[in-house]
Amino acid sequence: MVKLPHSFAMTTDNPYRALPSVDRLLADERLRPLGGGERPVVTQLVRQALETARGAVSAGRPAPTQDQIVESVLGLAEDVFHPTLRPLINATGVIIHTNLGRAPLSEEAIAAMAAVSSGYSNLEFDLEAGERGSRFLHLESVLQQLTGAEAAMAVNNNASAVLLALSALAHDREVIVSRGQAVEIGGGFRIPDVMRQSGGRLVEVGTTNRTYPRDYQDAITPDTVAVMRVHASNFRIVGFTETPGIDDLARLAHEHDVLLLDDLGSGCLLDTTQFGLAPEPTVQESLAAGADLAMFSGDKLLGGPQAGIIVGRSELVERLRRHPLARAVRMDKASIAALTATLLHYLRGEALEKLPVWRMIAAPLAEVRRRARRWARGIGPVAKVVDGRSMIGGGSLPEESLPTKLVAIAGDGAYVTDLARRLRRGDPPVVARIEKDALLLDPRTVPSRQDSTVIQAVTAALSE
Ligand SMILES: *Cc1c(COP(=O)(O)O)cnc(C)c1O
């Protein structure tokens, strides 16, 4: 038998006795809006709060009152019923921010998602024939029109597009990649690892900074199935460098009867030099040069939903569609709808006006300045408008930036860090850029309809 301490035997002194019962708490008025005892989750939260209260007692603290326990149940409910994934305001000036969800969608893309999600659709149904169809066909014609590709398909993201292509085409075969391109894209996506996972054998050629056509040529064996180019999306090697262009690679690959695979990363359809940015390789150039398959993301510079788009020769795309992995990495109907709507903006020649990513890139400096001034006026004398740069970000155009106007709130490191934290904890959260002696807010990455929300959020955070 367990021997209880004296105080436990004396029920009048037992502090646990002061705690309300589960039933009594469930009957409390203040918990009624949660649905009370009929909802198992509420009973569970009550038990959880009581457990914490017992913990306090066993640690020698006074027993929490019923009011305090009800408060903690309400706090727990607030956490449980609040989705952790929330919209926020990106005032960092990084246009394609992977941690903040990459590309915002156009209104048309959002409407297309809603339309196809609120009911049934012909996702895999051929309306003419009245029989089973393929989900891969919905995007094909618009992608053919835009890129000139013979065939096209889209999967969950570009990482799965590359994995699928290598699995379907390079299993037990060799794929030649320049040492300067055997890279890590981020989030643990490393070309050598993806190659291993696909069953392909990576043959690295050249050096980190210099690879010549003859390096590829010397590495071709009867086991070689492809040469692959990987776009260096998130870094740049400068100085004494050399990499064959896509034209040279195509010529070389085809002379030796091997495939040319092109992982474009961001996959741009527009000319970036019109905005004073470095040229980002376009999908059209890659195919025109002779890439057999080109792969790119839907939610980087394309400005659409998360997706991996694969364009190229019919016979290869067909092999990818039939591979078992294609089923595992397929896109869902809402994303297919959003991607189609996004691509249609390009086809109609309205991408710069309709797609938020391109609107932000194309926003004239005068407009950004006007908004920065409005923010600064709204916030008060602590806010100053200063020159700065907006970053493209997101594995596109490494190191490339656009001139911008920032709202700066000066302060020492601890003050600025704390202010940024208060902004992140607001509703909606505002994410700012922190520099050592200032908090910086870039209007370029904030839709103008949220100007007053930003001013209010900053004002509240400053007065907290
Ligand atoms: C971003 C990127 C990927 C991964 O694309 P996700 O759409 O994020 O899966 C693959 N390759 C390159 C070169 C990239 O830049």
Image (cartoon, rainbow, N blue to C red):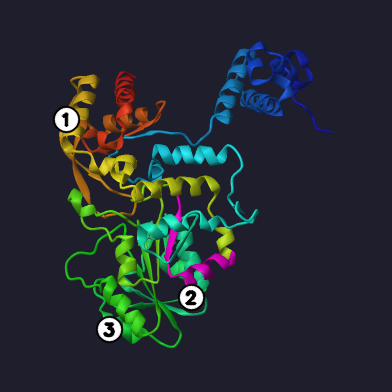
Question: Which mark is first along the chain, 3 or 2?
Answer: 2
Query: Going by the image, does 272 lie left or right of 84?
Result: left
Amino acid at pointer 1: Val
Q: Which residues are magenta?
A: 305-324
Total numbered badges shown on the rendered structure: 3
Amino acid at pointer 3: Arg
Amino acid at pointer 2: Ala
- Disc 2 + disc 3, Cβ < 8 Å: no
Q: Which mark is residue 366?
A: none
Residue occupying image coordinates x 52% and y 45%:
334
Task: Find residue 106 and report its horizontal and vertical position in percent.
Answer: 39, 40
Q: Which quadrant: the N terminus?
A: top right
Q: Which mark is residue 170?
A: 2
Residue occupying image coordinates x 29% and y 65%:
285
Mark 2 is surrounded, within 10 Å at the Cα level, by few (under 14), some (14 to 19) or many (20 or more) other residues, namely: many
Decide: is 433 above or below 12: below
Task: Find residue 156 and report its horizontal and vertical position in percent.
Answer: 50, 54
Residue occupying image coordinates x 46% and y 34%:
86
Residue 321 in sight in this render: yes
Magenta stretch: includes residue 313 = yes
Q: Quadrant of ligand 1?
A: bottom left
Image depth: mark 1 or mark 3 in front: 3
Mark 1 is surrounded, within 10 Å at the Cα level, by few (under 14), some (14 to 19) or many (20 or more) other residues, namely: many
Task: Find residue 100 and report its horizontal and vertical position in percent.
Answer: 39, 42
Residue that label 3 marks: 214
Between 337 and 8, the residue placed more toward the observer is: 337
Residue that label 1 marks: 385
Residue 208 in sight in this render: no
* Res 226 → quadrant: bottom left
* Res 203 → quadrant: bottom left
